[in-house]
């Protein structure tokens, strides 16, 4: 029996501006921190960049036609802030806006519902130069002005707006860098702007990114059409209970609330969790009057990016009630160094978010995996590992919905192979293969599976 999803469930795919568009200086666009970061030797594998990427800026019409042919019902893309405001604020650039109007019109004509993300990490370089990026309130305030402007200009066409993508990634990896064990050695992974701040300063960046989100929600409400729906897309830290006993489930719930202390918990509760704050010692953010009200502004949906569990937990007889369980070195992985394999994350993530905060709507704003995809002799791409992953992930998500999590749609990362940040172009996440020499697009086996699944609203 195929597992059927609820009526109206959205089968979507996702991308982001810097990862696919190319054309970094076209039509008056200002530079972003990613344009700068990629120029520094050693930052990106093989010295690659998003300068061309998949040239979506020039090919969006045929790309949208391909999405339509694959039966994509909703498409999550991001707007490049420096295309709209080349200096981050000040005078808008009409040609930049025009690109997104044309893209959205094309999607609507193809019957695809657009979800626009306002910040997928490509901060205008000017705001980095003037304010140190998200280290100062001026950037959060400029973000809100940009969000309000986009809502005013686009909310007649785009109903669903995502404020910020993955707070934890761009803040913690961009302003401090994280250490990760890769192939037996520890490497430091950074994203733009590639800073190494002290913990106290990092805490302030986290707070100001949250503030940017909150002020943007308020600006979108003030300037967008009344029917506009808004929410964030956070890579929620998912705690998976080692076994589904009531005690371990309660432990996982407590762990999730605590581990999401920097971002999701304050966004959904309008306050920092007191135990989390206490554990930060001196390194707490400076909070001004009105900040928490903005940060906790009511949302229409919560977007979750889920690829893997953050942690396995079991119950513990202590005040906090949970303890982490060490992950075995032999635990299976997908192709990215960080990608621990466990589809259960797609069950426990939405399920525990629902238990903890009861959002009205949850979207899986990202889920997917990289694989070593190559064209076969007949031009086919048989990504059997991705297929295994996606089917298992969707089965777990189906179970979360059956248990009451209000998941209204899923966006696979990614529609196309693209520029995977410091991993460069060869880390392929697409359901559609891209030959970077010729820019030829080839749907992989997983794209055909997607097509059949979307058509039948079930796991094919
Ligand atoms: C997420 C990012 C996205 C992509 C995937 C693989 O963390 O939001 O841009 O890089 O990972």
Image (tube, rainbow, N blue to C red):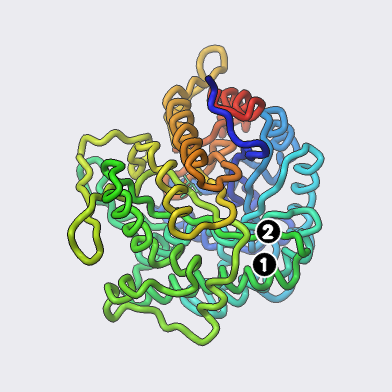
Please tell me whether residue 376 is drawn above or below residue 344 in the rendered image: above
The residue at the far bottom in this view is 289
Residue name at image x 58 percent, y 71 percent: 297
Pick the residue in front: 291 or 164.
Answer: 291
Percent across and percent down for residue 323 are 22, 55
Label 1 crowding class (10 Å Cα cut-off): few <14, some 14-19, many 20+? many
Which is more N-terminal, label 2 or label 1? Answer: 1
The residue at the far front in this view is 246
Pick the residue in front: 150 or 7.
Answer: 7
Examine the image and state in which quarter residue 341 appears.
Answer: top left
Q: Which residue is mark 1?
A: 147
Q: For the residue labelled by badge 2, is the local secondary structure a helix, a strand or a loop? A: strand
Q: Which residue is mark 2?
A: 229
Percent across and percent down for residue 186 are 23, 50
Pick the residue in front: 160 or 250.
Answer: 250
61 lies left or right of 441? right
Residue name at image x 67 percent, y 35 percent: 72
Percent across and percent down for residue 146 are 67, 69
Residue name at image x 52 percent, y 13 percent: 377
The residue at the far left in this view is 317
């Amino acid at each position: 029996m195929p597992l059927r999803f609820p009526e109206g469930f959205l089968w979507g795919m996702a991308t982001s501006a810097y990862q696919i568009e190319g054309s970094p200086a076209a039509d008056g666009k200002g530079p972003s921190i990613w344009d700068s970061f990629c120029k520094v030797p050693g930052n990106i594998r093989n010295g690659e960049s998003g300068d061309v990427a998949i040239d979506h800026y020039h090919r969006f019409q045929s790309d949208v036609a391909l999405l339509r042919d694959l039966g994509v019902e909703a498409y999550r893309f991001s707007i490049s802030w420096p295309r709209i405001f080349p200096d981050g604020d000040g005078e808008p650039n009409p040609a930049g806006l025009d690109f997104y109007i044309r893209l959205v019109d094309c999607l609507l004509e193809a019957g695809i519902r657009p979800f626009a993300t306002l910040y997928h990490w490509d901060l205008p370089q000017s705001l980095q130069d003037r304010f140190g990026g998200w280290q100062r309130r001026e950037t959060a305030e400029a973000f809100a002005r940009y969000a309000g402007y986009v809502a005013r200009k686009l909310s007649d066409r785009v109903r669903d707006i995502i404020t910020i993508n993955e707070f934890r990634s761009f803040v913690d990896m961009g302003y401090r860098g994280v250490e990760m064990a890769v192939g037996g050695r520890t490497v430091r992974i950074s994203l733009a702007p590639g800073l190494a701040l002290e913990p106290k300063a990092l805490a302030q960046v986290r707070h100001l990114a949250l503030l940017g989100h909150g002020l943007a929600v308020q600006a979108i409400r003030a300037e967008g059409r009344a029917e506009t729906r808004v929410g964030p897309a956070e890579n929620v830290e998912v705690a998976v209970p080692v076994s589904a006993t009531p005690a371990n489930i309660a432990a996982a719930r407590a762990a999730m609330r605590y581990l999401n202390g920097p971002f999701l918990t304050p966004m959904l509760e309008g306050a920092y969790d007191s135990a989390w704050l206490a554990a930060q010692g001196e390194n707490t953010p400076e909070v001004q009057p009105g900040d928490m009200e903005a940060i906790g502004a009511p949302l229409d949906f919560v977007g979750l990016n889920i690829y893997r569990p953050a942690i396995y937990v079991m119950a513990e007889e202590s005040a906090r009630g949970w303890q982490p369980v060490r992950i075995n070195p032999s635990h299976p992985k997908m192709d990215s160094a960080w990608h621990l394999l466990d589809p259960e994350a797609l069950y426990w993530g939405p399920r525990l978010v629902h238990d903890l905060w009861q959002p009205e709507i949850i979207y899986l704003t990202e889920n997917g995996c990289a694989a070593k995809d190559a064209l076969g002799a007949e031009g086919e791409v048989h990504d059997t590992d991705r297929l295994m992953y996606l089917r298992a992930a969707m089965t777990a998500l189906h179970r979360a919905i059956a248990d009451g999590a209000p998941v209204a749609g899923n966006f696979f990362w990614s529609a196309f192979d693209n520029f995977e940040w410091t991993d460069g172009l060869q880390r392929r996440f697409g359901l559609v293969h891209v030959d970077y020499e010729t820019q030829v697009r080839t749907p992989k086996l997983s794209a055909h599976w997607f097509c059949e699944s979307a058509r039948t609203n079930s796991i094919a």
